[in-house]
Amino acid sequence: GGPGYLVARHLLDLALIPSLFVAIALTATSIAVSVAVWREAGVLNTADGELLLDVAEMDDVSGVALLALLLAVVPVLTGSQNDSVVPVLAATTGIFLLKAVFFGGLCLVFARYAERPLTAFLTRQARPHPILFVVGVGIVIAALAGQLGFSLAIGALFAGMVFSRDPEVVRLNTSFGPIHDFFVPFFFIGVGLNFDPGTLASASVLAGVLLVVAVLGKVIGAGAPALLATGWTGATLIGVSMVPRAEIAMVVMHEGRKLGADVVPPEVYGAMVIISAATCLVSPLVIAWLLRRWPQGSDRNCSV
């Protein structure tokens, strides 16, 4: 995020607020893109694969937290409010943490005490199919997250974590596939509808510069700390696997876009669309090649 802000603000000469939105969008990652490659290679359950999942989830959660803080101070930065930035940040952080504890506590209580009995009961019934219960609860949790000011995507992530400890639900995952395939295109349709083709030339210039930051920021920013937990090959794999940007990055830009062209100009939004497309298309090819070159095992030391 830091290099992203510096490049956007001082090298590309963007205004303060668009530069902040760019920086926060670049902190996120698209966990689904890389996880699919690791799963196809049969190494998602290795130590490095589990570390990747943990880091990617934290990236998305922290990205939403930073977005909430930015949305709170945008009126101050634009001059529409005369408040000081520091009190606004402090108050927003405190409220955000209280909401996070409340939301996380509800998910934890449901996961520990209610999920398995309810799922077991529905599994014994002829109908409805238990996957409908999983989908229904997932929608409710995502909606609650949205009402609390979190992203719907974060709510969906927590919904998956609520059910992930139950092996019965995990075995139902194949039934969830068609529902996933049905809804995913609508996200990208929304992204495409907000893209202005008239800004393609200027957006491509911005994207070309920011793409370098987007790649190096994750390869170095995530890969270097990963050396504390794994070998250099595992750290490289984790860094490269964190490069794709899609859901949360575009949620950040979409929220800024709703505030007006002064907050997120069309060419800046278009640049992030190009970055998302490029990282999501190229990264899986690189990850698959690296996984073939550096086979992963069940032991964390195997990647050294």
Image (cartoon, helix red, strand yellow):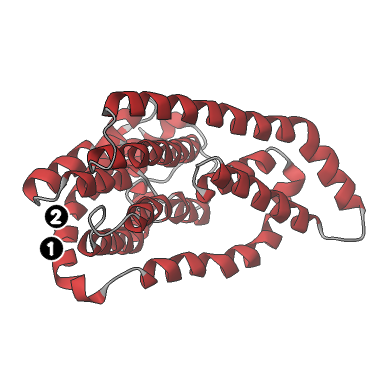
* Residue hosting label 1: 205
Cα separation between marks 1 and 2: 7 Å
Residue 209, label in figure: 2
* Residue 172 visible here: no
Say which residue appears at 53% left-offset and 26% top-offset: 98
Residue 186 drawn at (x, y percent): 50, 69
Residue 279 drawn at (x, y percent): 31, 58
The one of 73 and 155 positioned closer to us in this rendering: 73
Say which residue appears at 79% left-offset and 31% top-offset: 113
**Amino acid tagged 1:** Val
SS at badge 2: helix
Query: In this view, which residue lies farthest toward the bottom?
Result: 198
**Amino acid tagged 2:** Val
SS at badge 1: helix
Q: Quadrant of the N terminus?
A: top left
* Residue 225 visible here: yes
Q: Is residue 143 above or below residue 195?
A: above
Residue 301 drawn at (x, y percent): 42, 29
Q: Is residue 39 above or below residue 79?
A: below
The one of 150 and 131 positioned closer to us in this rendering: 150
Say which residue appears at 64% left-offset and 45% top-offset: 141
